[in-house]
Amino acid sequence: MTSHGAIEQAAFTLFRARGFEATTLDAIAEAVGVGRRTLFRYYRSKNDIPWGQFDRTLAGFREILENTPEGLDLYEAIGSGIVEFNRFPTEASPPHVERMRLILETPALQAHSALRYGEWRQVIAEYAAARLGVGADALEPRLLGHVGLALAMTAYEMWLDDPERSLTELLTQSLTALSDQVGRGARSAR
């Protein structure tokens, strides 16, 4: 039986062997033992495969944010949500580090990734907007979405440089560093 997991396993095996750009959907379909049309029932394009079941992932991110502990200020709640969202099982297959390396370092995926990043930022913007009582397109929710993505991207880049480091610790350090800088800026503006 075909599944998202079987498609991803076959695709990543081919990506490793041939490279992303040289791997065709026909080759992935053949490796899975299905027709090309079947792949399109699971993924809209080859560019979607490295992202996995991204809609489900975003639904999980929304749930994490909605369930952040009460009493956290908005910034802390978003930061906590980002850290929690980025906890992945070490036995994930393909490994999360491999998935993120492909997404972040493959030029052919950059334009597609921009769309996915926009969807990810929107989850934060919607959460922030609800907490602030404003629209998701207001300045602060949008800003928090962009800042959240910048924090995550910085931690991911550092993690890919040294995968032995803890991604969640890098995210936590990024949050602390930004909070310290914002605090300094607020103090110096007085």
Image (cartoon, rainbow, N blue to C red):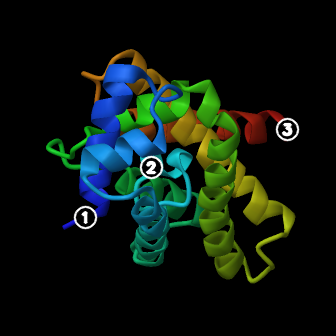
Q: Is residue 130 left or right of residue 137?
A: left
Per the model, the C-alpha gap separating discs 1 and 2 is 14 Å
Element type at mark 2: helix
Q: Which residue is mark 2?
A: 49
Mark 3 and mark 1 lie on one chain; the one further toward the N terminus is: 1
Mark 3 and mark 2 lie on one chain; the one further toward the N terminus is: 2
Q: Which residue is mark 3?
A: 189
Picture coordinates of residue 123, whole percent (x, y): 60, 67
Can residue 97 be seen here? The reply is no
Inspect the image, locate mark 1, and give the three-letter code of the amino acid beneath it.
Thr
Q: Residue furthest top?
A: 161
Mark 3 or 2: in front is 2
Residue at the spot 40% in from the left edge and 77% down from the top edge: 67
Within 10 Å of the Cα at label 2, are there few (<14), some (14-19), or many (20+) other Cα atoms? many
Picture coordinates of residue 22, whole percent (x, y): 49, 25
Picture coordinates of residue 70, whole percent (x, y): 43, 77
Within 10 Å of the Cα at label 1, are there few (<14), some (14-19), or many (20+) other Cα atoms? few
Mark 3 or 1: in front is 1
Q: Which residue is mark 1?
A: 2
Q: Which mark is residue 116?
A: none
Per the model, the C-alpha gap separating discs 3 and 1 is 58 Å
Verify CB contact (< 8 Å) between mark 3 and mark 2: no
Per the model, the C-alpha gap separating discs 3 and 2 is 47 Å
